[in-house]
Structures are given as structure tokens and as C-alpha cells.
Image (cartoon, rainbow, N blue to C red):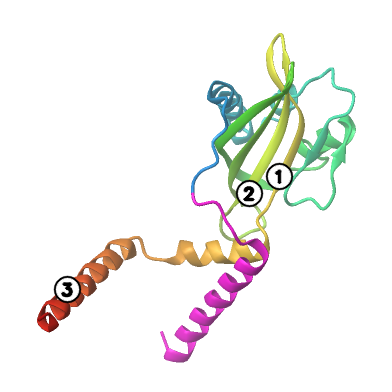
Amino acid sequence: MHAVKKWTAVAAVAALTGAAWAGGHNQLKEPAIAMDQALSAELDAVLNDYEDLWNAQDPAGLIAMWDQDDPEPFYLAEEQDEWRIGWDQVKNYWDPPGPSGTEALRMRFDGVQARMIADDLAFAKFWIRFDTKMKFMPKPIGTDARASAIFRKKPEGWRLITWAESPLSPILYVQKLYEMRARPDFPAFMEEVKEKKAAAEAQAAAATAP
């Protein structure tokens, strides 16, 4: 890489990091873990079934995972600029009119943590990994997003009533793109550099000791 380009990239990362600290300082240093791990595992299993339906592109199956008795479901997809409210709008999201533009789609829901918010209601947070190939795109694309949902306990199991996806802010998104571009062997190289530096400093300290 040309020196100017290299330092431009470094400066961009530094600027992004500085901006991130200015607007989103005090980031968590450890995972956020809910107290009710049994519930978290239960809803993780529900979301595993949900992702299978997504991967099969089964709109009827997805709709069936929602509480059919709920009068007004809420749904917010990360690529949509507004919430969908009510059954007509929510169902239209999964099964829009016209031919599908999707060749293949894969969803993954990970990092599920949950808590009860009422006797029959549970809230869960999780991450979405989304990979797809659209007919009008030359290559597959993928992205990550945070998400949360509210489930109602029914005789047939947990059913959704609210779903919200929360994409990363532009600062965090670009920062993670830079992180993803680092070569897989760089952490090992970094540790090697640290060890050599520590050895050199110890050697210098020993040489100057009385």
C-alpha cells in the first residue's frame, strides 16, 4: 500500500475511534448476561425454529410463529424506514405481491438473552446475521444487526407479538468493517511483537542496572 494511502486509512480509523468514544464511550468490556438463563435457552430454541423458516423462505410458517390472537403486532425490519403495525402490514412484509427477487437467504439468531416482563410475556435481545443473494445483485451480501422481540406464552408455545431490528450506527458499522479486514493471523503476529518488545526492554533494564 502506498504510504499516503496507508496513513490516510490509519487516520480514518483514528478519527472513527475518536468519534466513537465521543458519542459512545464507556462500551461494555464483558458480555451482558441475563439472570434467567433457562428462559434465554428456551427462546433461543424458538428463534432456531424461526431461522429455519426464514432459510426455507416459508412466509406461512413465519406468520404461524406469531400470536394469531394478538390484535396488533408490531414489526420493524432494519432495511425499512418505518414500523409495520397490524396484521395486514406485517404479513405483507413476508409475502409481498409479485415474484420474489431472492435467490437464497440465510438467517442466524445468536446471543439470545431474555427476561420475563409479565406472567405470560418475555423480552429477548439477540443478534441477527443475514446473508442473501438477490437476483439483481452480482454477488451475495451479508450484514449483522442487533434485534429484540416480545413473546407471549401460549398453549402451543412461545409466539411473537413485537419484533425490532436495530442496525449499527455508521461509526460502529465502519469500525467493524475495518476490524473484519484485519488478517486472521494478525493477533498471533501482535503477540510475537509484544514478546520481542518486552524481551528487549528487560534486556535494556538489565544492562543499565547497577
Q: Which mark is residue 165?
A: 1
Residue 179's place in the image compared with 118, above or below, is below
Q: Residues within 10 Å of mark 1 (few under 14, many from 20)?
A: many
- The x, y position of residue 6, in whole percent, is 45, 84
- Which residues lie in the magenta part? 1-29
Q: How many marks?
A: 3
Circle 1: element type:
strand
Residue placed at 78% from the left, 36% from the top?
A: 95
Nearer to me, 16 or 79: 16
What is the C-alpha distance between the residues marked 3 and 1?
Answer: 51 Å
Residue tagged by mark 2? 145
Q: Quadrant of residue 90?
A: top right
Kindly indicate whether the residue at mark 3 contacts the one at mark 2 (C-beta within 8 angstroms): no
Q: Position of residue 191 (x, y in %)?
A: 27, 64
Q: Residue at x 61, y 67 (%)?
A: 20
| Residue 60 forms part of the magenta stretch | no
Q: Are marks 2 and 1 in contact (CB under 8 Å)?
A: yes
Which residue is label 3 attached to? Answer: 202
Q: Quadrant of the C terminus?
A: bottom left
Characterize the magenta stretch by its predominant secondary structure: helix
Structural crowding at the residue carrying mark 2, measured as other residues with C-alpha within 10 Å and reported as few (<14), some (14–19) or many (≥20): some
